[in-house]
Image (cartoon, rainbow, N blue to C red):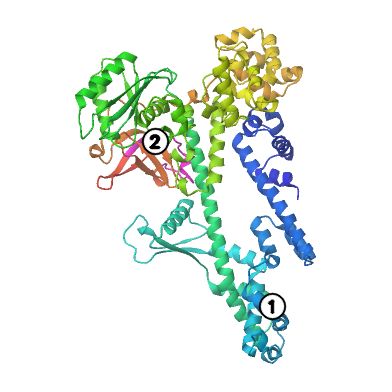
Amino acid sequence: MDINKQLAEEFNIRKEQVDNTVALIDDGNTIPFIARYRKEATGALDDQLLRELDERLSYLRNLEQRKKEVFDSIETSGNMTEEISVSLQNAITLAEVEDIYRPFKPKRKTRAIVAKEKGLQPLADFIMEQTLASPYLEAAKYIDEEKGITSSEEAIQGAMDIIAELISDDPEIRKELFELYSSRGVIVSKASDDQKESVYSNYYDYTESASKIPSHRILALDRGEREEYLKISVDFPEEDALKVISHRYIKAKNECGNIVRSSAEDAYSRLIHPSLERRLRSELTEKSCKAAIKVFQDNLFQLLMQPPVKNSVTMGLDPAYRTGCKIAVIDEIGKVLDTAVVYPTPPQNKTEEAKAKLKYLIKKYNVSVIAIGNGTASHESECFVADLIKELDSPVKYMVVSEAGASVYSASKLAAEEFPQYDVSLRSAVSIARRLQDPLSELVKIDPKAIGVGQYQHDMPKNQLSEALGGVLENCVNSVGVDVNTASCSLLSYVAGINGSVAKNIVAYREENGAFKDRKELLKVSKLGKKAYEQCAGFLRVHGGSNPLDNTAVHPESYSYAKQILDLCGFKLADLKNGGYVGIGKTVSEIGTKSLASQLGVGEITLNDIVSELEKPGRDPRDELPAPLLRTDVMDINSLKAGMELKGTVRNVTDFGVFVDIGVHQDGLVHISQLSDRYIKHPLDVVKVGDVVNVKVLDVDIKKNRISLTMKGLN
């Protein structure tokens, strides 16, 4: 099997691209490095496709390895045939390989094994011939009380057990039946015994085609079953399954044929159906998990890439009732300036005292924006802040930010090391402020599963979810770039080529020797060798260092090309410190990109990347996105009326719709059917987390705290 050829066909790319990419992966290069600095080799494949290709490559290699193991095992046992060998070669999934191996796989003591131990295999073979001879007369020959066979009927039953297992182990039967299960099977959900009203009530008597049931519904059913509210099964017409088996195994309408038919019925009900039911449900769950993880990845990427609120002194407010609202003021780069605790909410209701304290802090530190956590007492705190803003002399805006995972971070060892002088709640206030100021830098400190921008994330396979979300974090961090002199260990650990241990060594080196002067100095860091340097250097920035190119995304391996381009275009390297080379792109175009690339001996893609970076050195891709929606006033759910048009921020995207923050503490739901006038397959086709959208209120259910919205015709 030519794996690279198969990958090229599956991903619809040239085999040369696959060959080069696989070689780069096998050589130990990271996906961000390959995506950014090896575009010539890969044909500019993006990091997402590269990750998918890498994952598929691993699967296909594991498949080939398993095929070899199964082949060797069957051959060693002396059972290998040309037919089995061809079947193995043609198998395209691990499940198919296991079905082929099934008859030869060591088993626990089954009924068939017991029958074989009693010497009934020849009787089973005789019955399978389905001649006119009486099977009962033949069976009488096997009566042996020492072996526990006291009658022809007992001998026949043992033979039937052998035949049933033979049919059950037939890989062709299983393959054909599974295809039918996948296309025509029905998922059936029933209430478990004595169930009352619950969130799963809609599924107490529910059926849906296995081929059409959406991913989020599969995950809901799985959870309902785990929590013992539901009983789930797969329904498939038994007569249709028996037709498939009969066509292959029943040769005659006689006594032997009838016994084979009875054996087939037993094989199906006792062995095949339970096995295929488990497999279908397992594959539906696996497919649903992959879909959910994909949604989680997309949401997390958009959340992490939210535009930072730069150059603003920010106040973080972690709301609470009894214990008070924790306040933290941070400067433009996230350094804590002051902290406080105020009690504007019930039961204390010390509103005026709280206002006085916040006014003092706002004036003292020139606070321009307030970040409010969206947890307990958030709405009351938001009302308090909105009233406070009206009384201020200077312009201040606020934004409610998700505090998902903030408590996890604030109680972590990392937070304790970062803020040993503050208690857990004040650390949370700092985190909330920093989330608005620089979402990426702050959220990388938190386990992605705790950030809460997906669906059923706690039901996902942990390793699969962690790997996928780690890839998103890695992609975001490397897309933006990292200031090596200010970045935390958490942020540095997601830079290509740097693990947690090396990240700590970078910070330790920085603390001992002062700020890095240039990228080359990274080679002095313990355990950061040449390979790691190659992978990470282009993503690390050195602001104000000795070489202006160190503050760009130009990789050190391309510095000579960058300098030659500058010389040919009449620019000086020192000019880079003044904001870049305006017009260099136009000059390169006039010279001719192809001609210049040939002259320098560099690829055109790499040349264009270098020129683009020289025009806007150290640019932050997040700056090109719409700014977050900041507010100065607040509403509540009681003030909403059907038909009202509002502006809101997309907080979460799921398979069935979008949750939008419209400033009333409770997010509204735009069902997938209300997202667009045209048909869409998934909400992500229309919106993403962080988008500022126009919505109209369709319905408000105050008792259930539900808001239904529409976006049709508004965006």
Quadrant position of residue 29: top right
Q: Does the stretch in magenta take in 386?
A: no
Q: Magenta residues, as a range?
A: 675-696
Compared to residue 520, the image places residue 685 above or below, namely below
The answer to whether marks 2 and 1 mark residues whose Cβ atoms lie closer than 8 Å is no
Q: Regarding mark 1 in the picture, which secondary structure is present there?
A: helix
Task: Kindly identify the residue that appears in the image at 52 percent across and 47 percent down.
Answer: 291
Q: Position of residue 31 (x, y in %)?
A: 63, 34
Image coords of residue 73 (percent x, y)? 75, 61
Query: Where on the picture, by quarter, is residue 204?
Result: bottom left
- Picture coordinates of residue 271 (x, y %)? 58, 71
Q: Which amino acid does label 1 sit on?
A: Lys
Residue 643 relative to residue 715: left or right:
left
Q: Is residue 617 visible?
A: no
Q: Please tell me the numbered disc located at residue 116.
A: 1
* Amino acid at pointer 2: Ser
Q: What residue is shown at x 38% (from left), y 38% (from top)?
A: 713
